[in-house]
Amino acid sequence: MDYIVLALPGNQFFAEEIAGFLQTNLGKLVISHFPDGETYLRVESSVENKKAIIVCTMDYPDKKIIPLYFLAKTLKSLGANSICLVAPYLAYMRQDKSFKTGEGITSDYFAKLISGFADELITIDPHLHRRNSLSEIYSIPCKVIHASPLISEYIKSHILNPLLIGPDEESEQWVSEIAKNAAAPYLILKKIRLGDRDVQITLPEIKKYKNHTPVIVDDIISTAGTMIQTVRLLRKTGMTAPACIAVHAIFAGNSFDELRKNGAGEIITTNSIAHQSNLIDISHLLARNID
Ligand code: R5P
């Protein structure tokens, strides 16, 4: 099969890795904006009869979705056989139910939108909470890759005597796996979300682990509210500064600095979203998973 790899702005690094792995070139793409803000897009490479792989991580998705849609449609109009979307971070997974009267289930709507123009999807650790798999909402084949083996490796080689901490019940799915592979004990806390930036977390009795290094592991850091509350509780017990690890580094506003100010130790994320805390490279995991 002939491939062509196309990077939406900001996705060059991953796209190059994938193109290298598939021994193909990066497609040439011009994207700009008209004076009124509308998107202009031109594909300058031949895509006819090729499988087009679009690389676009989906943090801040609202401004990315139109260029992505236009690119997919343009590629098809130019004769591409199929479109594979590689989205290291997949957005709109957290509004997976109607929490208050009048709300829509936007994870479903987003999934329908993507399924309408892409033929397959590859992503890393999507936030599956009330859903068991992406196929419940996406109607195209989806491949989910897990960063947990790389996180376990990082912990094993960089953190002495770790105690893994999952900040809420849904984190148990990845924390237990990471702990098993890092041969470390783990605890799962209880979290109640009171608002976008407001969470209440309860810490169980932790005395017997007082000489461990706490390592808080979560899938996403968005406002960092979850990490900050957990760090504060752990610091109150007199434990050493907790390491904070997440797959997806959204870090809205000044939340990264806030997390540091509140007593976090090392902050470690994968490069599914480019950020200064990226210490775990997942690009080869992605590249290996393109069929
Ligand atoms: C929970 O729903 C997720 O696993 C994360 O704990 C959450 O998204 C983190 O968000 P924030 O950084 O805004 O607390």
Image (cartoon, rainbow, N blue to C red):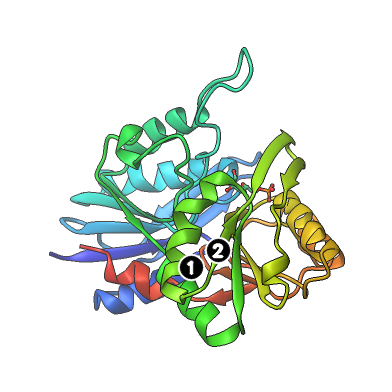
Q: Is residue 68 above or below residue 99?
A: below
Q: For the residue marked with disc 1, what is the amino acid?
A: Ala
Q: Is residue 103 above or below residue 267?
A: above
Q: Quadrant of residue 144?
A: bottom left
Q: CA distance from mark 1 to mark 2?
A: 6 Å
What is the crowding at mark 2: few (fewer than 14 residues within 10 Å), some, or many (at least 20)? Answer: many
Q: Secondary structure at mark 2?
A: strand
Residue 26 picture location, percent across and down: 35, 71
Residue 94 picture location, percent across and down: 54, 38
Residue drawn at point x = 24 percent, y = 78 percent = 23
Q: Are marks 1 and 2 in contact (CB under 8 Å)?
A: yes
Q: Which residue is mark 1?
A: 179
Q: Is residue 136 visible?
A: yes
Q: For the residue marked with disc 2, what is the amino acid?
A: Tyr
- Marking on residue 217: none
Residue 88 picture location, percent across and down: 45, 59
